[in-house]
Image: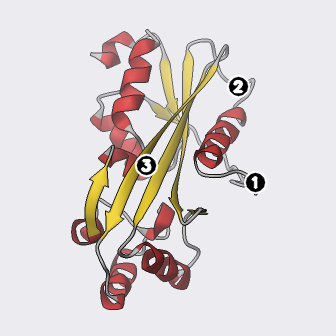
Amino acid sequence: MLKEKLKKYTLILASGSPRRQQFFKDLDLDFEIRLKDIEEVYPPELKAVEITDYLAELKANAFEGELNEDEILVTSDTIVWHQNKALGKPKDADEAFKMIRSLSNTTHEVITSVCFKTNHSSTLLNDITKVTFNDLSDEAILYYIQNYKPYDKAGAYGIQEWFGFMAVAKVEGSYTNVMGLPTAKVYEYLSTLV
């Protein structure tokens, strides 16, 4: 299907996330991985989707002047947006605990932006999923942090792990977006390029 249509292009995923890499495999796309070390800092006045749009573009712009004519670069960024602030990846167990405790028994948004860059264009798309957590005990939160070490995940949790099965009461929107990539939107957009 799409793999066949894209065969004259080289699809580049600029993400070290094992989940995003697995999504591209599961979407049956041929791709290569190219990584750059980017300091993910954004202007403090940005809110919600403005943050992820900014960071996805920042990651893509690091490849300016390096792409060949037949290459399509894909960059992405995900945050958890809760109580008017962005929750990124926790630095340590204490920060992870505070993040998850603040999400307990509330609804938050998971926002992902994806940037598609070629030599001639740059396009942003984004997706927002609302996630509602059950009322969580401190014991359950500590168990999760100690056993799953969610330090590489925005908001300090992975919906696809034990925690997601136990803690998530409701998901409104794309489930894969909560894992870091709105796969249906990405697939649909790539289909329009050919």
- Asked if 21 appears above or below 158 in the picture, the reply is above
**Callout 3 amino acid:** Gly
What's the distance in space between the residues labelled 1 and 3, CA to CA? 23 Å
Residue to which mark 1 is pinned: 45
Residue at x-position 73% and y-position 55%: 41
Tell me residue 79's x, y (percent).
53, 55
What's the distance in space between the residues labelled 1 and 2, CA to CA? 31 Å
- Asked if 16 appears above or below 160 in the picture, the reply is above
Circle 3: is it few (<14), some (14-19), or many (20+) Cα within 10 Å?
A: many
Residue to which mark 3 is pinned: 180
Sequence-earlier tag: 2 or 3? 2
> Is there any visible trace of residue 30 in the rendered image?
no
Taking depth in this image into account, of 66 and 188 the one nearest to the observer is 188
Q: Is residue 128 left or right of residue 168?
A: right
CB atoms of marks 1 and 2 within 8 Å: no
Outermost residue toward the bottom? 139
**Callout 1 amino acid:** Glu
Label disc, if present, on residue 66 of the rendered structure? 2
- Asked if 144 appears above or below 117 in the picture, the reply is below
**Callout 2 amino acid:** Glu
Sequence-earlier tag: 1 or 2? 1
Q: Is residue 122 left or right of residue 125?
A: right
Q: Secondary structure at mark 2?
A: loop
Taking depth in this image into account, of 17 and 163 the one nearest to the observer is 163
> Quadrant of the image for the N terminus?
top left
Q: Secondary structure at mark 3?
A: loop
Tell me residue 50's x, y (percent).
64, 44
